[in-house]
């Protein structure tokens, strides 16, 4: 059976965790992000990544993209819990639809000289990262891609003098002509 | 008055609030004044359509409004001030959220220019109440006020009902704006609860029920919340199918306790027959209940051989704790109506005589039995006598939380919905007394009894003063065992009988306390005195504190021990020290 052993007698849960990307369309009004985040913290759900911005200015609609992990039962709960909030229009599980594109933007700062600088530039080109700031001893790269690509780029930069990283978190959209 | 005084819809925010209450048919509100709601209280003073009941503590206002709402089916309304007024409402709001009770709570707030300034009696009301409301609003501009108030009533009372908070800064109460009556566009377009069940799912459910050999119906508070039509249809379904029915604590009264298919309440302190039927059934029809941990016991051993149908208006209730085979999202009355129609038209009711024979064997175990005593009043006996004395009367029962609550659920028979008010989800000690106030306000001529415990009742005792002020003849029937009985029971069963702080060493003299409040105190000590004392309590047309001295160490059985399944109940006859110790070994971690 695919359910926790007991609701109040805490035992190990053996269900495998899955990562899901959820797109949530909400009315952009004060407190709406706090509601969503409060739901996650209050019910003990995970947030791996969260991005939010107004997408339809006229209608005051914002789009929240959340990457979360949990057992299939918990993921289903998260979607229903989000969907029943008063200012939530729609919740779409981009992972379940299987037809979505996910992108993240990262800015990666490096400090170094000599061979490290050359190597960093060479790798940046391979990853299609752009230099958006440079001094004689540093670079800031801008890189866009899915999370795995960005993780890989950061890993490669580490021995070359990585200073810090700023990431936007994941934004997702469905393929094809249809909107969500 | 402003220059636009010729326009009747031009008014202050405070006046809008009172006007909105009137437009939503509100007759009574429960509240407590303070600095940030003075303009609203000024408006209340100058009208007579809405009666304000002044409580003694904001928590009392909240529970009173809950009692009012549950006994009428209409939203209860609360008005409290900013800061402590709002924070004192957190318990009733959470209580109402857990039990799906419609409440509209209006809170005052410091003026908008002081918000965030740590002003006197300021708190982040919408922040604090966000997790304990269905929705909440801070109204920063008087032009939004009418819309928000109307939406608040709509959200509280539709879909899965629940509490809402409208936080209104004092300057918005003073500001003048244009009021409009309720209209459809007041509500978020994103809020649209589903009422009608999916026809295909309903057909599947009927097919499953019609082929069942061991069916059971498990109903809950959602049937009560849906309105009297849902209870009527539930009864019709039971009558038509001949299926056995059990119910949660919250659902008592939807099907009559005197009905022949009634198995009694299920769950931790439910009857043996109800829990065994749940465990051994092959088809379960859950209507408006949520598979709460007090119901399921050990979830991996919960009703292992059954296919499960779940009717609920809230999709997040489905598949939360238990895997459901046929979910049906919709309002209980609506779905039950459709289901019954399809059943009658397309299916034959199954032959379940052998199932009833099995149930009869479980019933014969007589799981609610207790040893009679002629010297000391047993709490179960007290409730049975109270039930007998009030049978056939127009009676409403509220409770506090603990052993007395479970005994009330076990031994008081409820024939109708909306007659039983108890704090089920949150388990709020101190709920019953103010809830009884609210019920009595809504039903001034009915008999309203709070079955209480000596510990719980002291949490909101101050509201007896409210009862006296408004001549509300509530009866507080205290099963006084001088313990926090349920805490003690768990300490006995799970913590080596170390009774840490569960004994009240200094109880008040409840009879004298009653007199101090200006109400009537009655005491019963011997079983022989009980009937006469109850009769006196009922005949007195004033608020009564009834001090019923009961056996101090009586415990509540039957019981599903911690981490155990429905078929591992501990029955009263078997609850000797050894069996109890064995049953509860390793169960400390539960709540």
Image (cartoon, rainbow, N blue to C red):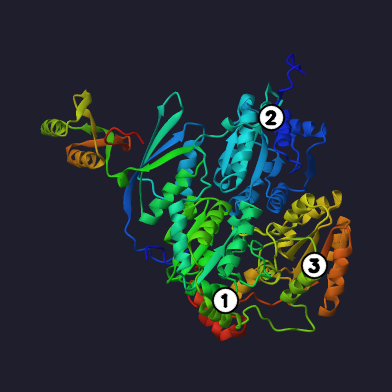
Q: In this view, does B569 lie to the left or right of B411?
A: left
Residue B21 x %, y %? 71, 36
Circle nearer the N terminus (2, 3): 2
Q: Residue furthest front?
A: B345
Q: Is mark 2 on a helix, strand or loop?
A: helix
What is the chain letter for disc 3? B
Residue B403 x %, y %? 66, 69
Q: Residue at x 54, y 66 (%)?
A: B217
Can you see residue B519? yes
Give the residue at mark 3: B390
What is the chain letter for disc 2? B
Does B496 appear above or below B112? Answer: below
Circle nearer the N terminus (2, 1): 2
Residue B452 x %, y %? 73, 64
Residue B170: image tag:
2
Circle nearer the N terminus (1, 3): 1
Q: Are marks 2 and 1 in one subunit?
A: yes
Q: Answer whether labels 2 and 1 touch (C-beta < 8 Å).
A: no
Quarter of the image with the N terminus of chain B is: top right
Q: Is mark 3 on a helix, strand or loop?
A: helix
Q: What element carries label 1?
A: helix
Give the residue at mark 1: B273
Q: Residue at x 18, y 24 (%)?
A: A136
Does B171 appear above or below B259? Answer: above
Residue A134: image tag:
none
Q: Image quadrant of residue B8?
A: top right
Foreground: disc 2 or disc 1: 1
């Amino acid at each position: 059976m695919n359910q926790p052993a007991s609701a109040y007698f805490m035992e190990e849960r053996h269900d495998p965790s899955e990562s899901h990307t959820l797109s949530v369309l909400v009315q952009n009004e004060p407190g709406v992000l706090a509601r969503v985040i409060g739901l996650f913290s209050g019910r003990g759900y995970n947030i791996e990544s969260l991005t939010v911005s107004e997408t339809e200015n006229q209608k005051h609609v914002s789009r929240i993209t959340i990457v979360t992990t949990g057992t299939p039962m918990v993921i289903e709960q998260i979607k229903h819990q989000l969907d029943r909030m008063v200012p939530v229009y729609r919740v779409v599980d981009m992972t379940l639809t299987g037809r979505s594109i996910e992108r993240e933007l990262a800015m990666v700062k490096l400090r170094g000289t000599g061979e490290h600088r050359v190597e960093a530039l060479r790798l940046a080109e391979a990853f299609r990262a752009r230099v958006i700031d440079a001094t004689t001893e540093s670079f800031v790269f801008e890189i866009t891609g899915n999370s795995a690509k960005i993780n890989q780029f950061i890993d490669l930069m580490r021995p070359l003098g990585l200073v810090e990283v700023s990431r936007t978190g994941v934004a997702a959209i469905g393929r094809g002509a249809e909107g969500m | 008055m402003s220059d636009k005084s010729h326009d009747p819809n031009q008014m202050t925010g405070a006046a809008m609030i009172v006007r909105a209450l009137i437009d939503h048919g509100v007759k009574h509100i429960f509240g407590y004044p303070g600095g940030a709601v003075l303009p609203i209280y000024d408006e209340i003073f100058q009208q007579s359509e809405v009666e304000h009941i002044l409580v003694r503590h904001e928590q009392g206002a909240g529970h009173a409004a809950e009692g009012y709402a549950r006994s009428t089916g209409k939203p209860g309304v609360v008005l409290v001030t900013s800061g402590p007024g709002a924070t004192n409402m957190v318990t009733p709001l959470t209580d109402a959220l857990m039990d799906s009770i419609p409440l509209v709570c209006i809170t005052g707030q410091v003026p908008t220019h002081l918000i965030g300034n740590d002003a006197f009696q300021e708190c982040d009301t919408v922040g604090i109440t966000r997790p304990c409301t269905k929705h909440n609003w801070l109204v920063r501009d008087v032009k939004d006020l009418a819309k928000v108030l109307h939406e608040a009533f709509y959200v509280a009372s539709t879909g899965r009902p629940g509490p809402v908070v409208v936080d209104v800064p004092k300057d918005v109460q003073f500001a003048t704006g244009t009021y409009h009556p309720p209209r459809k566009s007041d509500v978020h377009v994103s809020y649209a609860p589903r009422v009608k069940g999916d026809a295909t799912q309903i057909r599947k459910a009927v097919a499953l029920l019609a082929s069942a050999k061991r069916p059971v119906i498990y109903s809950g508070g959602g049937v009560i919340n849906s309105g009297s039509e849902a209870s009527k249809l539930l009864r019709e379904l039971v009558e038509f199918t001949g299926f056995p029915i059990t119910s949660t604590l919250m659902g008592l009264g939807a099907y009559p306790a005197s009905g022949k298919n009634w198995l009694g309440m299920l769950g931790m302190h439910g009857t043996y027959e109800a829990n065994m039927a749940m465990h051994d059934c092959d088809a379960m029809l859950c209507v408006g209940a949520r598979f709460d941990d007090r119901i399921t016991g050990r979830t991996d051993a919960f009703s292992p051989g059954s296919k499960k149908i779940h009717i609920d208006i809230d999709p997040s209730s489905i598949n939360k704790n238990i895997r459901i085979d046929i979910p049906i999202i919709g309002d209980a009355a609506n779905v039950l109506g459709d289901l019954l129609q399809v059943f009658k038209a397309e299916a034959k009711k199954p032959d379940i005589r052998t199932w009833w024979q099995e149930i009869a064997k479980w019933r014969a175990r007589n799981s609610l039995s207790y040893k009679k005593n002629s010297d000391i009043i047993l709490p179960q006996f007290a409730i049975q006598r109270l039930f007998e004395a009030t049978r056939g009367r127009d009676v409403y029962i509220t409770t506090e939380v603990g052993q007395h609550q479970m005994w009330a659920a076990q031994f008081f028979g409820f024939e109708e919905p909306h007659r039983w008010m108890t704090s089920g989800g949150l388990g709020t000690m101190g709920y019953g007394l103010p809830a009884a106030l609210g019920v009595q306000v809504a039903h001034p001529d009915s008999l309203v009894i709070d079955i209480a415990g000596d510990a719980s009742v002291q949490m909101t005792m101050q509201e007896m003063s409210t009862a006296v002020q408004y001549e509300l003849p509530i009866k507080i029937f205290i099963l006084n065992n001088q313990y926090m009985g349920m805490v003690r029971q768990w300490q006995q069963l799970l913590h080596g009988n170390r009774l840490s702080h569960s004994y009240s060493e200094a109880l008040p003299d409840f009879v004298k306390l009653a007199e101090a409040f200006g109400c009537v105190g009655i005491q019963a000590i011997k079983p022989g005195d009980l009937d006469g004392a109850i009769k006196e309590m009922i005949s007195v047309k004033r608020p009564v504190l009834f001090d019923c001295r009961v056996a101090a160490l009586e415990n509540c059985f039957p019981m599903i021990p911690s981490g155990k399944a429905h078929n591992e109940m501990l029955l009263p006859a078997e609850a000797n020290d050894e069996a109890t110790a064995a049953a509860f070994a390793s169960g400390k971690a539960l709540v």
